[in-house]
Structure formats: structure tokens, C-alpha cells
Image (spheres, rainbow, N blue to C red):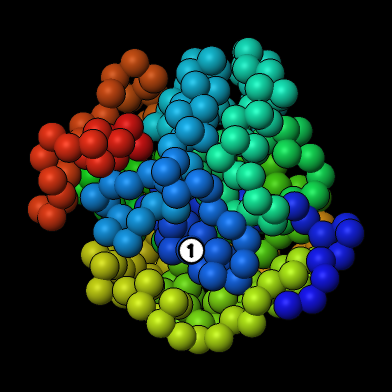
Amino acid sequence: MGRRHRSAPHGVLVLGMHRSGTSAATRLVNVLGPATCREDDMVRGPWNPRGHFESRSLMHLNNALLGQMGRTWWYPPPAGADYDEVAAAITTSRARARRVFRSVHGVTPWVWKDPRTCVLLPFWRHVLGPRLAAVIVFRNPLEVAESLQRRHGFPPSFGLALWERYNRLLLSHAAGLPVLVSRYDDLMTDAGRWTEQVSVFLAGLGMDVGAPAVDDAITSFVDPGLRHSSHTPGEISDASSAAQAVYDGLEAVLGQTASFVPPPLPPEPSSVEQELRSLGPDRQPDWHPPPWAGHGDATGSVAREE
């Protein structure tokens, strides 16, 4: 491995909606060299048998930030002009958030993922500074909605609205970052090739990354057998024109760029907010553990918080 360029990113944000492969993506970025959080702070839970690869402390902090905004992970901040007004309610200082981050990510370069960061990206960009890179992973919204239905009992229409809001905010707030946009399908189909693309992207930014050899560290981690649903892009429009528009926007920006330019999107229809308000911030979603999950243990309690 060579010397890291002095202007290289300090870390990599893996960004994507819940149930979209961000845990697998984070592990594959980690294989290239960037460090995950401290082992004792890593979230463990039954919904990802191979690990979540995210920080428990930062998950709790993100939940607190959303709470200060009067929001939750299942009722995210609004898209568009109203976002800044809601985000202004955050009381946690950037200095405080920076201390928490450094306490669990003490090694540079690092890799961090938490789906909540998709809807809190402006705050974290201020906290972490300009030397960031982002790897975005997106999945067919119908598959995400079905996974959320199995996990939390969300109606498919609610899961689609949640997917649309997360990805709309992510696309808007990633502007100007070095970004690699990738499909969940490509990661699952050929993890070795996906990792090679990430390696080229990060090396091009001056990061010192390891050789992306296709070995057991890659191929054994991504198991297509853990995938429980599959839909084609052509099925999306029949279920949600709003999700279709955002999905098309993501497809339009596939690949890497040194300074991300969000795709043009039509305004979010009012039906998305109406759907999200059907649950709102005060009503806790259900928790349906998978058949292989333990009952009443610590990992189950962590998973319920997600």
C-alpha cells in the first residue's frame, strides 16, 4: 500500500435506505482498508446475520437528532424548502457530535454507515468536514417495502413512501461530494466487481486502499441466498409514480463523480407526506423478529430500535 494523498478523504459514508444492502457494502469497503467503529460499539442484531457494521453510539445519536426535530427514522424530515426549518430545531452541538464520532471512529480513514444519515446528511457534513467520500447503494423500492413489511408490519404503500423520502433527501444533500452511486443488485450479483469499482473510486480520490482481491473475505460475506424478494424496475411505476421518479433519478447518476450533481426530480407529491403521517412520530412501529432471532436478548432489543 502506498502513501495516502494529503487531500484524500478522512472517511467514507455508506449511504442508503434501510434494507438496501448498506451493511454488506460497509463490510466490503472495510475490506479495502477503511476502519469500522470500535468492535465493542458495533450494532449486533438478528436481521443481519452477518453483521450491521455500524456504531451503536452513533445510531443512538442519530435517533436523538431526529427526536430534536420532532421526527423519527420512520417519519423523516420533509423534503424541499421545509427541511432547513425543521433541522433548525437540533440542539446537539456540532462539537458534541464530533466528540461522539471520534470516540468510536478513532482510526483514519474510516467507513461509517447508518441509514438515518441519509436524512441527516447536512448536519453530518458540517460535523465531519469537507474531506468525505460517499458510496450510495440503492435497491428496488418494492423489495425494500416488502422487507419493511416483514420486519415492522408497514403497509407496502408506507414502505414505498419512506423509500422515496429517504432517497430524495439523500440525492439533494449529497451535492458537491465525491460520490459513487451503485445498485444493490450489482453488489449482490458480483461482490468482487463491485468492490473493485469502489477501490478505483477511492484510489482516485487519493485514499490508500488495499488490492481488491476476490477472496473469501468478499465472496463469503455477500450471500444472495439471504435475499427474500426480487422485483424488476418495470414493476415500480404500477405501485408508486413518486418512487419511480426517484428511482429513475438514481439510475441516471449511476457511477462515480468527483462533485455530485443531483438529478432533476419532480416535486414530492403530497401523498408521500400523507402516507408517512399515517404512522407519524408518536406511534412506535411493530417489531416482527425473523425465525432465527433470539427472544428477549440484548441483540433483539438493539434491533427493535432500528
Q: Position of residue 270 (x, y in %)?
A: 50, 30
Would residue 285 be found to the left or right of residue 124 on screen?
Answer: left
Residue drawn at (60%, 44%) of the image: 105
As drawn, 262 above or below 215: above
As drawn, 229 above or below 199: above
As drawn, 83 above or below 248: above
Residue drawn at (66%, 22%) of the image: 96
Would residue 120 be found to the left or right of residue 273 on screen?
Answer: right
Front residue of 244 and 199: 199
Front residue of 110 and 170: 110
Are there few (<14), some (14-19), or many (20+) residues within 10 Å of tag 1? many
Residue 221 occupies quadrant: bottom left
Q: Amino acid at mark 1?
A: Arg
Q: Position of residue 61 (x, y in %)?
A: 51, 27
Residue drawn at (23%, 45%) of the image: 151
Residue drawn at (44%, 63%) of the image: 24
**Can I make out residue 128 in this image?**
yes
Would residue 288 be found to the left or right of residue 163 on screen?
Answer: left
Q: Which residue is mark 1?
A: 27
Q: Position of residue 302 (x, y in %)?
A: 30, 36
Helix, strand or loop for disc 1: helix
Total numbered circles: 1
Give the quadrant of the N terminus: bottom right
**Can I make out residue 269 in this image?**
no
Residue sitting farthest toward the right:
6
Residue sitting farthest toward the bottom:
214
Q: Position of residue 42 (x, y in %)?
A: 42, 45
As drawn, 143 above or below 296: below
Give the quadrant of the C terminus: top left
